Image: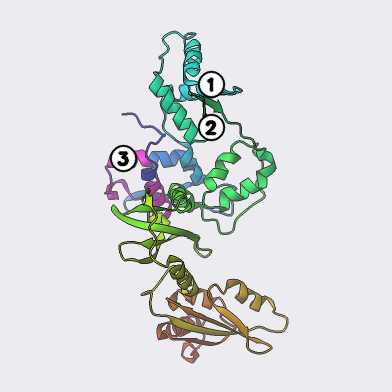
Amino acid sequence: MAYSELIKNFNRIRAYMRSFYVYGFRHRGEYREKSARGYDDERRRVENWLGDYMTFRQDASGRRFFLSVDSRAIPHNPLYRAFKAKSFTDRDIMLHFHLMDILDGSEGLSLFEIMETLSDRLNRFDGAEYPDESTVRRKLSECEALGLIAREKRGRETLYRRLSDGVRLETWREAIDWFSEAAPLGVIGEFCRDKLKELPSPFRFKHHYILNALDSEVVLALIEAIGEKLEAVLTIRRQKLSVLPLKLYISTQTGRQYLLAWSYREPLLRFFRIDAIDSVKAGGAAQPPLDLGGKLDAFARHAWGVSRGNGKTLFRVEMTVYAGADEAHIPKRLEREKRCGRVEQVDGTHWRYTAEVFDALEMLPWIRTFIGRITDLRCDDPAVTNRFSQDLAAMARLYGGDGDAVS
């Protein structure tokens, strides 16, 4: 069978692209999940879409290709190209454009009228293949699901009409440019941008988490389940888990996306990394546990990040930082980034941050950003203060200081 750039199963290409982007291409002989032929086909697809961003390094086994993207230098996320390579047949695309043209400008046509017009058009071509009524009806339903046409009842008759865009996208150019690169479902903005004249984008991103583009189908399914108050069946590493999806979280530190859901199996509130979810299937109507709102409030009051520890034990963290009289930005930053904690002024130059969290170790990366200003650090979990002291000692040794003097 000849190789084709078009794809039918996006979930498969999602797995390949994530593997190639994050881990780099494995050699053909190293790839065990699929056949060598399958590996070659998927590699060529990615090369067709992202050839400008591919490079390689040489090792003992030969060339190892991988994707190399400087997010500061690209105006648009290149991974969206995978969504534009959809498989279709010649007859399918022919029927699509005929229907769009037939319905253009009409107030509504019945299936019989559409079939008559389509037949008149195809009669002009020698050897034209005529689609049957069920095929046309199925195509109309597909276009309706995509929001391209509307179906309505008039008496006993069902009429179809084409929907106009109704929006001047040009007036939304800047919003579309930003949305396509920064929002969880930015692929929608990408398709809107395709309808606009190509102009330089006013935005560049220092931290641009482009890999989230590959999770768009999973995110959409979760948002629909949350909006319709449905349970969801998650497939993770070939295992299925029934959950009640509640909220989506995006880390400002790593760009990773997470789902907060009630897991019926445990049962408890859990975070799931969205890039680890293979697929989502809508379940039945939501059956929330008793006092879910109270559980959510209690969870939010003590969750710093996505770790819930054992979900019962809380650890108190106290950090006092110095801020000079002309450094009002320091207490403002504490207030802005405090999350579930509290900030209080100790005296004219010192501010204390206090929080009770499930996992205090999660806070260390943030706490370290105040090194040089921290005058006191205390925690119920000794692992936190010990780790902090060890990190300071290691840094002192690295820069030639006396590591033993750090306490």
Task: Tell me the mark number nearer the camera, choosing from 1 and 3.
Answer: 1
**Disc 3 target residue:** 38
Q: Which residue is mark 2?
A: 148
Q: Is residue 287 above or below residue 354?
A: above
Between the C-alphas of marks 3 and 2, the distance is 35 Å
Find out whether the residues at labels 1 and 2 contact each other: C-beta distance under 8 Å: no
> What residue is rendered at 40% in x and 23% in y?
135
What is the residue that sits farthest to the front in this orientation?
A: 155
| 146 lies above or below 343 | above
Q: CA distance from mark 1 to mark 3?
A: 45 Å
Tell me the residue that label 1 is attached to: 109
Mark toward the start of the polypeptide (1 vs 2)? 1
Q: Is residue 30 magenta?
A: yes
Judge whether residue 332 can be spotted in this image. Answer: yes
Q: What's the residue type where badge 1 is placed?
A: Leu
- Neighbours of disc 2 within 10 Å: few (<14), some (14-19), many (20+): some
Can residue 57 be seen in the rendering of this structure? no
**Identity of the residue drawn at 35% across and 53% down:** 234
Q: In the image shown, does 91 or 222 lie closer to the viewer?
A: 222
**Amino acid type of the residue tagged 2 in the rendering:** Leu
For marks 3 and 2, the one nearer the N-term is: 3
